[in-house]
Image: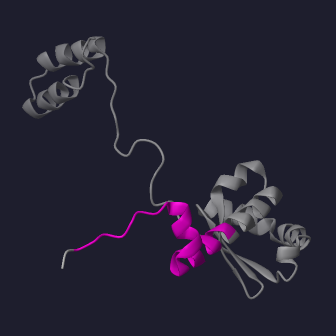
Amino acid sequence: MAFRPLTARAPAVLLREAKPLKAIFGHAQRLGHLQRLLESQLQPAAREHCHVASWRDGTLLLIVTDGHWATRLRYQQKRLQRQLQAFEVFESLLRIQFKVQPPTVQQGAVGHTMDLSVNAAETIQATADGITDPKLRAALERLAAHAKPKT
């Protein structure tokens, strides 16, 4: 008996037909809808720092990127709750919980990058040449080696 692979199906078809994927996709769509409603009531600066985690039993759980934003949102909690209750989806909203969870992937550069001009490197190297302490001289030479090459 030879193995016959299943015919490939488009991802959209799989999301509509496969029961586990259909449930996950439906849940993701629901959270996306709740997120859009929440963002419509948040200040523009707070939108990127606050995300809907769950909505069940009258409790809305929001994930906030840091303690600063969690504190700011807690001060606005009653107003936010009133505004969200105006939406049919949130009419049974009893409380809002905030959970601080920093993003797992940091934006920007992961490591520290050093940009050192050739002129600065030459100055540091000249300084290193006049130093008698071997450790300090070696440190300055390592620093001078970080110069950007001329292109």
Residue found 66% across the figure and 67% down from its top = 29
Observer-nearest residue: 51 or 34? 34
Describe residue 52's horizontal placement relative to residue 91 as left or right: left
Q: Is residue 82 magenta?
A: no
Task: Using residue 93 as the reference point, say whether residue 23 is left or right of it.
Answer: left
For this rendering, which residue is in front, 43 or 37? 37
Quadrant where the N terminus lies? bottom left
Specify start and end residues of the magenta stretch as a single range: 3-29
Query: Residue drawn 17% across and 29% down?
Result: 142
Q: Please indicate, yes or no, whether residue 99 appears anywhere in the rendered image.
A: no
Residue in front for this viewpoint, 20 or 115: 20
The image quarter containing residue 81 is bottom right
Q: Position of residue 12 (x, y in %)?
A: 56, 62
Q: Is residue 91 above or below residue 44?
A: below
Inspect this view and state whether residue 93 appears: yes
**Is 46 on the left or on the right of 21, as rendered?**
right
